[in-house]
Image (cartoon, coloured by chain):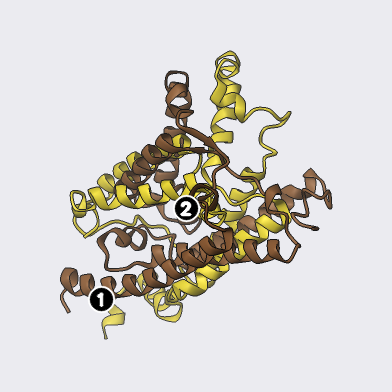
Chain colours: A brown, B yellow
């Protein structure tokens, strides 16, 4: 095992900030290439006539998931050293719904609003300002909701441990679901595009 | 003939539009593979995934600590983001600065950088900006409750098969589809 490089002490904290900047450039670049600097493109996911968001997201998840899995199997990457966010079931479901509502009302998510701002979209900038306001409100009410925010804690929880299915089997299943999902998404796009805009 | 009736500026603008049209977006699967490789690089090089809302948290906490140090001191949420001597020397803050640059680079090469307000055809600019701010605030709040946003939870946790991240991701889509029809006037 030699990766994650940072965790094996190959470079220090100062250099990690340069890595952060470079990785951010790659992240922003591909988000913009996909069309994610455009609110209408993003929102169209929820009106089913353009499922680019689903396709890009799941392709990215599958790509990285396969990479992590195989680099782990080959003994190159120690998966246990990758930072893993703990699970809080109910807060994450409630938070997820709030994000879904925010997506429809505002048209972006935090990362894509940064991309949108970078190409000059004023609505992206206002959305980003909104994110600051939302985080500030959260910070101010946190003492009141701390108990709820840390409820239903499961610690480090993976799908494969939870379902007692081998890691590799879940990886394979996610790939199959994604491929099926892509076919379904393309079918829905055609159907709803003609429904909404006429053929 | 028509060209002559345009002012100089407008002719330049029309010329610019004709010579430098916006390029089409990439094939979604190609862009997705690119994103996935960037995420994988973050795992391999750093041992962590991507993020966006976390950088906002650091900036907000730093701002609150500047204006009201005692208030920030007594708040567990802000304290989480103020552990370092200089809180702005934060991985996600630098990553998000990179996102700003990367988005701009991509936009410039595709002729997509321009000042505009993007909105559905049935609402005006002011309405759009108000809704964008409200949506952003909902997301900022929700992302903090969920421990991350589309980047830190859905993408990063999704690739790691994190149970909470998948529940979160399904809830985002469920929430969106739940109210999409009610708010269709914003987009269609």
- Residue under the point 45% across and 72% down: B28
Query: SS for tag 1?
Result: helix
Question: In the displayed structure, does residue A8 sit left or right of residue B98?
Answer: right
- Residue under the point 78% across and 54% down: A5
Residue ID for mark 1:
A190
Which x, y percent locates residue B20? 46, 77
Are the residues under badges 1 and 2 in a single subunit? yes
Which x, y percent locates residue A94? 36, 37
Q: Is residue B47 above or below residue B15?
A: above
Q: Is residue B96 above or below residue A75?
A: above
Looking at the rendered image, the quarter that the C terminus of chain A falls into is bottom left
Task: Compare marks 1 and 2 and give the one earlier in the sequence.
Answer: 2
Residue ID for mark 2:
A117
- Residue under the point 73% across and 58% down: A77
Q: Residue furthest bottom?
A: B1
Question: In the displayed structure, does residue A15 sit left or right of residue A124?
Answer: right
Q: Quadrant of residue A35?
A: bottom left
Q: Nearer the viewer, residue A117 or A70?
A: A70
């Amino acid at each position: 095992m030699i990766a994650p490089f940072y965790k094996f002490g190959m470079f220090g904290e100062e250099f990690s900030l340069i890595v952060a900047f470079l990785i951010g450039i790659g992240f922003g670049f591909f988000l913009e290439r996909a069309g994610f600097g455009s609110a209408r493109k993003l929102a169209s996911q929820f009106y089913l006539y353009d499922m680019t968001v689903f396709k890009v997201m799941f392709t990215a998840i599958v790509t990285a998931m396969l990479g992590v899995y195989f680099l782990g199997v080959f003994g190159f990457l120690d998966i246990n050293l990758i930072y893993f966010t703990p699970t809080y079931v109910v807060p994450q479901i409630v938070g997820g719904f709030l994000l879904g509502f925010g997506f429809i009302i505002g048209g972006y998510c935090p990362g894509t609003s940064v991309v949108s701002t970078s190409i000059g979209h004023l609505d992206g900038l206002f959305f980003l300002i909104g994110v600051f306001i939302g985080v500030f409100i959260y910070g101010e009410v946190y003492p009141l909701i701390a108990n709820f925010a840390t409820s239903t804690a499961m610690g480090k929880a993976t799908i494969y441990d939870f379902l007692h299915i081998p890691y590799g089997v879940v990886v394979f299943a996610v790939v199959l679901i994604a491929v099926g999902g892509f076919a379904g998404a393309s079918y829905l796009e055609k159907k709803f595009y003609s429904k909404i805009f006429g053929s | 003939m028509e060209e002559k009736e345009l002012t100089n500026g407008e002719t330049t603008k029309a010329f610019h539009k004709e010579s430098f049209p916006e390029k089409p977006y990439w094939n979604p699967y190609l862009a997705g593979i690119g994103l996935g490789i960037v995420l994988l690089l973050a795992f391999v090089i750093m041992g962590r995934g991507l993020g966006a809302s976390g950088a906002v948290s650091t900036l907000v906490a730093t701002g609150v600590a500047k204006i009201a140090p005692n208030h920030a001191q007594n708040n567990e949420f802000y304290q989480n983001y103020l552990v370092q001597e200089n809180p702005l020397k934060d991985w996600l803050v630098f990553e998000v600065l990179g996102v700003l640059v990367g988005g701009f680079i991509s936009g410039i090469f595709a002729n997509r950088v321009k000042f505009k307000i993007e909105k559905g055809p049935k609402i005006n600019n002011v309405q759009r900006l108000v809704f964008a701010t409200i949506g952003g605030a909902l997301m900022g709040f929700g992302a903090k409750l969920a421990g991350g946003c589309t980047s830190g939870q859905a993408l990063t946790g999704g690739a790691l098969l994190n149970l909470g991240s998948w529940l979160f991701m399904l809830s985002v889509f469920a929430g969106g589809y739940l109210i999409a029809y009610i708010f269709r006037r914003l987009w269609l």
